[in-house]
Amino acid sequence: MRRAEIGFSVFLGCFTLLWLTTGLLVLGYTPLVMRLPLLAGAFTLVMLIGVVIGFAGTAGSAHGPARATVWLNKAGLNRLFGLASILPAAILLGYQLGLPLFLAVYLTLNGLNWKRSLFSAVMCGLLIELVFVRILQVSMPAPWGF
Amino acid sequence: MFDAYLQGVQSLMAMDVLLAVAAAVPIGLVFGLLPGLSGLTALAVLMPLVYGMEPLVGLSFLLAAHAVVYTGGSVTTILLGIPGSPPNAATLMDGRPMALRGEAGRAIGAALVASALGGLVGMVALLALLPFLQPVIVHLGSPEVFALALLGISYIAIIGHGDLFKGLAAGGFGIFLSCFGYQDITGVPRFWSGSEYMLDGFRLVPLVLGLFAIPEIVDLAVSKRQQFRITPDSVSADRLRHGMREALIHRWLLLRAAWIGVLVGLIPGVGGDTAPFVAYGSAKQWARDPARFGTGCVEGVIAPEASNNAKEGGALVPTLALGLPGSAGMVILLGGFLLLGLQPGVGFLDHHTNVAVALALVLAIANVLAVIVMLAAVPIVVRLLDVRGELLAAPLLVLVVLGAYAVDENTMDLLFVAVFGFLGYCMKSLAYSRPALLLGFVLGPTLETYLHISLQAYGASFLLRPGVMVIVLLIVGGFAWPAYRRLRLRRKGDRDAPC
């Protein structure tokens, strides 16, 4: 956990530093343009250094355990990949077809009986069509290649 | 003036105005319940519908829908741990732990009553302040507005649960993220990397959904241990009533938070999303035991919800009196005024005080009506959500995808939901304050604009203006007060400890 704490702080710091350096040295922004990014970025970096020093000095114990979250196990990871399949489903098949299909397949694979899965998919399709397309006038993207 | 107030009440009593309010409330609540669809989206989507309506009917429709979005959002926030709209993020900090402890009904009851009473305070404030505030608001210069935005940021340290450095780092990083895209002052696009999408910088809705929705969905999906624990019993009528009573028991906290909402809402440009965070910070600061905040205490639900609904009353004051929107939602409402042939600003109150009074009453009616509708709907909402965690994750993700896409109709938003989702998951795992990041992101552009104007107009000496110095003292006090209290408690503990 301590390594993750320091690693995340370093990641945020590097991200900030990278953009500050790019803005100043590569893109050549004027001081007026860079004023707030510099103030905010420098402030963030100083605070992150404070976080890292705090952890390096106390071995993390003084800050208590990190807040409860669920670290990934194998079954969880599989479900996570299942959820991630929403993006290719939506992009390849379009939202109106891809999202209900994703829902039906995911729910069935995770133990819901197929009738309920199908019902959920139909409700999802109706939600998209009635609320988003008809009422909110959202133009849903077409399937890939159309 | 009294005649105008009377006329306002009479105009509100028209059947078409009341019908417009009755129709708008459920629509606003649905927008609040759906994660990602904020009051801004509600106003933007509904505005074309009012074209051609009588001005008061159209404005009542828009305002009622916008005003109750946060009431619906509070239920989603507590039940799912996903802010229904960005300002509900402050309620997340205590509302969600309460729900996980089986106290969802208590939290929802308290949130709904706080929302309704907050809305009533907003109405009272609007009615009372309209005649007097115009000269005061005119005297607020850019330096004072900049300092007020800094005051909002200073509460980041209080919001940050536990580690001050992490809270401040998250807030600073939020401001830094707000710097991407076109700079308001010069029009120069910053850090856009040649991507057309990034010309407008990071978008608020993908950021909110990524930071708050995705980590919850991942937690639901990856662990059977972390199942959705809201049972119909936890939102029984008794528990709802218990929560409602608690909101009344904490009436002084509720009133203080509502007035904070009104005051923050009054400041053009600063209001909006800042108010609930400031109210939460204030409640924590004044609490006898601040350590309870963040662990699921009802005060942490009451304060942000009361300020959330009260701020709309405050935000209407500069919108009507000066034509300066007090919150982001008021910007769109201002467009609604223009669409209906009214021009808010100096002089508006001279000719249309009755409209202003009627709108204040619309705020009150909509807020009370929303609570009645939500109290009836909560058991249905919970039953719909009474499924295994890993199964709930999928429909929630579908809603997130639809919500993220619907705002700008841009598939790139989905990519950023995923990116911010990763960031949010790491922040949640490592106890960084996600609301602090969001607050920094929201306040970033305000800070930059008013800092620039202040420096141009007064140079660095703007810091010596009396108003600014008072606000700076409040900021210093905000940092010093918790430290002082901790020190006092420690000394007291040492004195009480057995030798």
Image (spheres, rainbow, N blue to C red):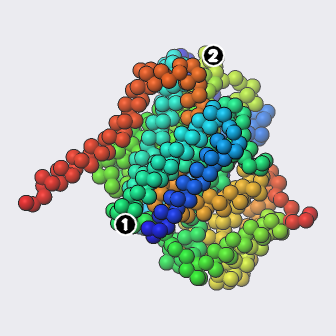
Q: Say which residue appears at 33% left-offset and 51% top-offset.
A: B290
**B299 or A25: nearer the viewer:** A25
Q: Say which residue appears at 48% left-offset and 31% top-offset.
A: B147
In this orientation, does residue B239 appear? no
In which chain is the residue bearing label 1? A
**In the rendered image, which quarter is residue B464 located in?**
top left
In this orientation, does residue B494 appear? yes
Mark 2 is on which residue type? Gly
**Where residue B361 sits: x, y (%)?**
55, 33
Q: Does residue B135 appear left or right of residue B398 in this picture?
A: left
**A43 or B180: nearer the viewer:** A43
**In the rendered image, which quarter is residue B376 located in?**
bottom right
Q: Does residue B379 appear left or right of residue A115 in this picture?
A: left
Mark 1 is on which residue type? Ala
**Where residue A13 sits: x, y (%)?**
54, 54
Does the residue at mark 1 contact the one at mark 2 (Cβ under 8 Å)?
no
Q: Which residue is mark 2?
A: B347
Q: Say which residue appears at 26% left-offset and 45% top-offset.
A: B485
Residue A92, placed above or below residue B18? below
Instruction: Kindly indicate whether the residues beneath marks 1 and 2 are on one polypeptide chain.
Output: no
Judging from the image, what secondary structure is the residue with disc 2 in? loop
Q: Which residue is mark 1?
A: A59
Q: Say which residue appears at 50% left-offset and 58% top-offset.
A: A9
Residue at the front extreme, as displayed: A25
Q: Does residue B366 appear left or right of residue B113 in this picture?
A: right
**B382 or B354: nearer the viewer:** B382
In which chain is the residue bearing label 2? B
Pointer 1 local density, CA inside 10 Å: few below 14, some 14–19, many at least 20: few
| Quarter of the image that includes the C terminus of chain B | bottom left
Judging from the image, what secondary structure is the residue with disc 1 in? loop
